[in-house]
Image: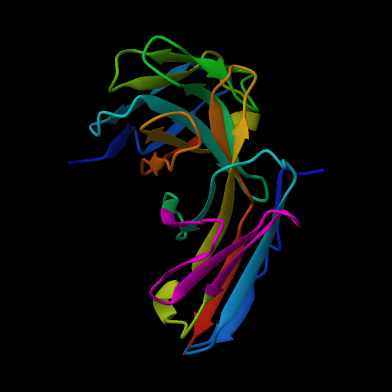
Amino acid sequence: NAGVTQTPKFQVLKTGQSMTLQCAQDMNHNSMYWYRQDPGMGLRLIYYSASEGTTDKGEVPNGYNVSRLNKREFSLRLESAAPSQTSVYFCASSELSVGNEQYFGPGTRLTVT
Amino acid sequence: RKEVEQDPGPFNVPEGATVAFNCTYSNSASQSFFWYRQDCRKEPKLLMSVYSSGNEDGRFTAQLNRASQYISLLIRDSKLSDSATYLCVVNLAQDSGYSTLTFGKGTMLLVSP
């Protein structure tokens, strides 16, 4: 099993460009999450999907949209990238969204110039 | 008040030393507690869950004090490979009715020969 996979691993965007970060899990988990991690800020939750068909905002949702495409896949879209969105983005999944342990993907390093 | 607070360190210890980290959390309703480990430029990985009665996994011991709302991690006989950032994690009930995880900013451990 691959666990949680993310694409791309690295990306450089210009201000105003758009892109979608892809995430997939093969553990048959119900819940999926998107985080960003910045130096000195720790992991912050952007959006989560407790189950297929539902999505909810986390701590820092502004500037992002998400789509839970099916049980396996959860994508994160930046419609108009800004330098403040330069960060490392992690996708995670868990069996249920009740505070269960989460399994993380390897991350996407995004730079917006 | 931050949800989960940790001393950022770094803690510099020699191989074989015993080291302890503490963290405090603000939400008295939290029910799930974890320690995650994050290596440089990698994704967080679950180290161990923390149970009310305390629990041990090899050289690692975790304790929970609900009354004082703090969690501890003790590492005995430190190895070079223990060098990493240790994240304290607690669950947080959301308005949606689901629960997500809140991550501390982490404590950096450096083990030297």
Relative placement, left or right, of B84 versus B66 is left
Residue A39 falls inside the magenta stretch: no
Instruction: Tell me where residue B9 sits by quadrant.
Output: bottom right
Of all residues shown, which one is farthest toward the right?
B1
The answer, for residue B25, to whether it is visible in the render is yes
Residue B3 place in picture, x, y as percent: 72, 43
Name the image quarter holding the C terminus of chain A: top right
Residues rendered magenta in the picture = B46-74
From the viewer's side, name the closer residue of A26 and A30. A30
Image: A36 above or below B97: below
Instruction: Tell me where residue B41 sits by quadrant.
Output: bottom left
- Identity of the residue drawn at 59% across and 54% down: B88
- Identity of the residue drawn at 31% across and 29% down: A29
Residue B66 place in picture, x, y as percent: 68, 53
Name the image quarter holding the N terminus of chain A: top left
Residue B51 falls inside the magenta stretch: yes
- Identity of the residue drawn at 23% across and 32% down: A26
From the viewer's side, name the closer residue of B5 and A86. B5
